[in-house]
Amino acid sequence: MVSTPANTASAQEERTARALEALRTNAFQIASDGQDAWSVKNGGKSPYLVKREEGNWSCTCPDFTQRGPAIRCKHIEAVRLSIESESGATNLSASHKEKIMSNTSDNPSDRIRWELRQPLDMSRVKRRQAPGLGSVPYLEGYDVIQRANEIFSFVWSFDLLKEPMIMRWQKTQTYYSQQHRRKMPVLDDQGRPVMDDVGMVWVTGKVTAELDGKTVSHADVGRCIFSGDTPEALDMAVAGAATDCLKRCFRQFGEQFGNSLYDKEVAQTAGLETTGHSTGQPGGNGHTSAQVGGNGSTSPSRNAPAASRSPASNTLSIADAGKVVFTLKPKSRPELTGKTLAELQSLAPDILTWLANEYNATTETQAMKDAAQVLVTSKSRESKILSELGFAN
């Protein structure tokens, strides 16, 4: 898309307005980080570094990286406005500032419409791996709920329209064979293909909010694939499907809830600066996946990666974490040695919890501990979402 002066001016005004709102509500924590350098922190997110060199501004946030320097991001604007306010040299006219501030306070419906029209803050976007699609951008469930609370002032609801639908089937475990250069079935001791119990949950729901004294509703379907035949696997899948449904319903309210992430051009780069936060959780584009499999574990290939090759926990997906091999040798449970962590999650969840929280890892076993933390944290997060949505744990 070719930017015109009018588009640039409009985009800049929007970011200036967002900076003013952040300053008004004390959403930003601005701290000096040396001469002509500031750190800007928004809630629990990592701070961004704003710099001014010979009158030129820069910021490390994704928005400025993609659109600067022609358009200053809200972090730069917050710093600039703070400095100019202190010196009394603000460039904003009183009428312009009053107009922006009134949009966020006078008429609730006007404020809601104004906020819904704002461009999506790309720092909210995460990425996850999608089978056959590389990585795709998405908004996390808690982020959508938090933004909805801010925009609609907690006056909204999410309702299920019918009971969750469940479909189950079996599929053959496979692994990629370098020798044959294709996927091959995993075989048991008798040479028979090892089968996985898998399934999918569908949830139909709607989101309702209030606008101009009337209720506005958007409905959609959420889904979540799961592995295994345990209550825990189904619980996580129901929670994942409900979260996916909630996000897809809110998406119909537009930009603030990730509708633009379905644009192929936007999807190519959105969230690339925040991939380190992705942990394979339910995504915004496409269905979600609950990685709990066969008898409460994933059903991994016997060629599962060793812990020493496991990536760090902040980039490790649930599926990969489940494939990491348990290399410790507990005297009371020697049969657990050599099992994957996904199998350990089913056979000895207390040992998995101990590994994640209490075990003092060495250099060789740190990756295994990281993977255990991914699995334990994922289970805790899904249980919390399940509880918040009104489902029994």
Image (cartoon, helix red, strand yellow):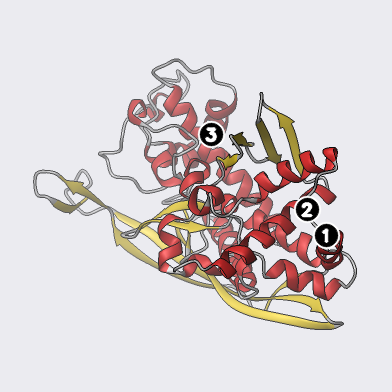
Instruction: Report the disc number at residue 20.
Output: 2
- If you read the primary sequence from the N terminus, does the residue marked by circle 1 or circle 2 appear first? 2
Three-letter amino acid code of the residue under disc 2: Leu
Tell me what residue is drawn at x 73 percent, y 66 percent: 115
Three-letter amino acid code of the residue under disc 3: Gln
Is the residue marked by circle 3 packed among few (<14), some (14-19), or many (20+) residues within 10 Å? many
| Vertical arrangement, residue 354 with respect to residue 81, above or below | above
Indicate the position of residue 6 as horizontal and vertical percent values: 59, 70
Which residue is farthest right? 106
The residue mark sitting in front, 1 or 2, is: 1
* Residue assigned mark 3: 373
Tell me what residue is drawn at x 17 percent, y 52 percent: 184
Query: Is there CB contact under 8 Å for labels 1 and 2?
Result: yes
| Vertical arrangement, residue 354 with respect to residue 43, above or below | above
Q: How many marks?
A: 3
Query: Is there CB contact under 8 Å for labels 3 and 2?
Result: no
- If you read the primary sequence from the N terminus, does the residue marked by circle 1 or circle 3 appear first? 1
* Residue assigned mark 1: 97
In depth, the one of 294 and 361 nearer the eye is: 361
